[in-house]
Amino acid sequence: MANKVIPLIDHRQSLQLPIPRVQEPTGLLGDALGRPLRDLRISVTDRCNFRCSYCMPKQIFDKKYEFLPHADLLSFEEITRLARIFVAHGVQKLRLTGGEPLLRRHVERLIEMLAALRTPEGMPLDLTLTTNGSTLARKAQSLKDAGLQRITVSLDAIDDEIFQRMNDVGFPVSEVLAGVEAAQAAGLGPIKVNMVVKRGTNDSQILPMARHFLGSGVVLRFIEYMDVGATNGWAMGEVLPSSELLQRLRSEFDLQPLSASVAGETAERWTYSDGQASGEIGLISSVTQAFCSDCNRARLSTEGKLYTCLFAHRGHDLRALLRAQASDSELAGSIGQIWGLRADRYSQLRSEGSGQTPSGERRVEMHYIGG
Ligand code: SAM
Ligand code: SF4
Ligand code: SF4
């Protein structure tokens, strides 16, 4: 809604980097709250062909908005070099995101480079990507061939009119569904479909989405609408708490809880069934049930800034180090120090009523560091 949008100021400033100190990674990094580093999310572009109102509202991200010039983006070689160092520090999972990651030209080449990385124990990484699915029908097979293992597709409604309103560029739901099918056929499963739920906008789609994906092998995950960034005019009244969502699902399905599959898992998992078919759903309750205590995720922005929390105001400029010819040991030393000092727990503080943004500081935008 136009009247709820807050004007954007450029938030892409960086934090002072620690003085590079040579450090050989041990894979045993812990932050100030004892949390390991396991998951790296890499934003490969800040551009997108959708204008979801909760992420890139049209009124702000219009023709005049200045996206990053190509020279500012990390190159595939720079991303791979950093990823290798993160892996030596203990990262086991890489997720490509954006903006819309499939808009980055030749992203398959990057996937090939990342797929060749190994953990210190010689294991391949869990390599995945989050996409709006708009070009997936064409690209699923080449992504799989490049070495991508799994994929997450964002889809906020199964009703075409509601979906087109939400992506705000009139993109039809049928093409995203064709992308999901192509990804399944290419073996990029188990496919996850993420639905951000906004009360009054698409909560009418909870049951239709659950019905649509029941028995399909796709894991449907409901995400509470979050107060990320500074442009979406977030209001608590538009959040549909997972507890309420669960009640709505129970009106039609039998639900049984599943245990977490890995430590640091963000979703609460359930099986659901209508007596004939069954499936799996996940609830990501980032607003009503903070999961900061075991948050093991770091985020690398499109231009190479390291963010230790989705709600951070600033990142650490690793690209500056890369382009100043820092050695691998110096890069590892900086990353180690940054993680060692990390004490972020924004969602937890928000739940306790003290997660306010310090005055004058704007939080980083989702399309710039990815979800
Ligand atoms: N463009 C890709 C996509 O939409 O899948 C990848 C980037 S997008 C920023 C990553 C995820 O963040 C999407 O699933 C999107 O729905 C989610 N997201 C964006 N803004 C959000 C918000 N305010 N609250 C909750 N999730 C959000
Ligand atoms: Fe684009 Fe994804 Fe943001 Fe929607 S959520 S505007 S598809 S980056
Ligand atoms: Fe992790 Fe920050 Fe989200 Fe907490 S608020 S779960 S620390 S990203």
Image (cartoon, grey):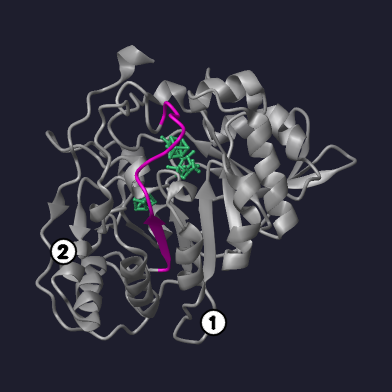
Question: What type of secondary structure mainly makes up the magenta span?
Answer: loop
Q: Is residue 7 left or right of residue 345?
A: left
Image quarter for residue 83?
Answer: bottom left
Mark 2 CB near ligand 3 (8 Å cut): no
Relative to residue 163, is residue 26 depicted above or below? below
> Which is nearer the eye, 262 or 211?
211
Q: Which residues are magenta?
A: 38-54
Label 2 element class: helix
Disc 2 marks which amino acid? Ala
Q: Is residue 246 magenta?
A: no
**What crowding class fits label 1: few (fewer than 14 Cα within 10 Å), some (14-19), or many (20 or more)?**
few
Relative to residue 321, is residue 274 depicted above or below? above
Q: Is residue 8 visible?
A: yes
Disc 1 marks which amino acid? Met
Q: Residue 320's mark?
A: 2
> Which is nearer the eye, 354 or 6?
6
Cα gap from disc 2 to disc 1, whole angstroms: 30 Å
Tell me residue 65's x, y (percent).
26, 31
Tell me residue 128's x, y (percent).
54, 60
Residue corresponding to mark 1: 123
**What crowding class fits label 2: few (fewer than 14 Cα within 10 Å), some (14-19), or many (20 or more)?**
some
Image quarter for residue 58?
Answer: top left
Q: At 32% from the left edge and 63% from the top edge, which residue is drawn?
A: 75
Tell me residue 12's x, y (percent).
20, 45
Q: At 30% from the left edge and 26% from the top edge, which residue is drawn?
A: 63
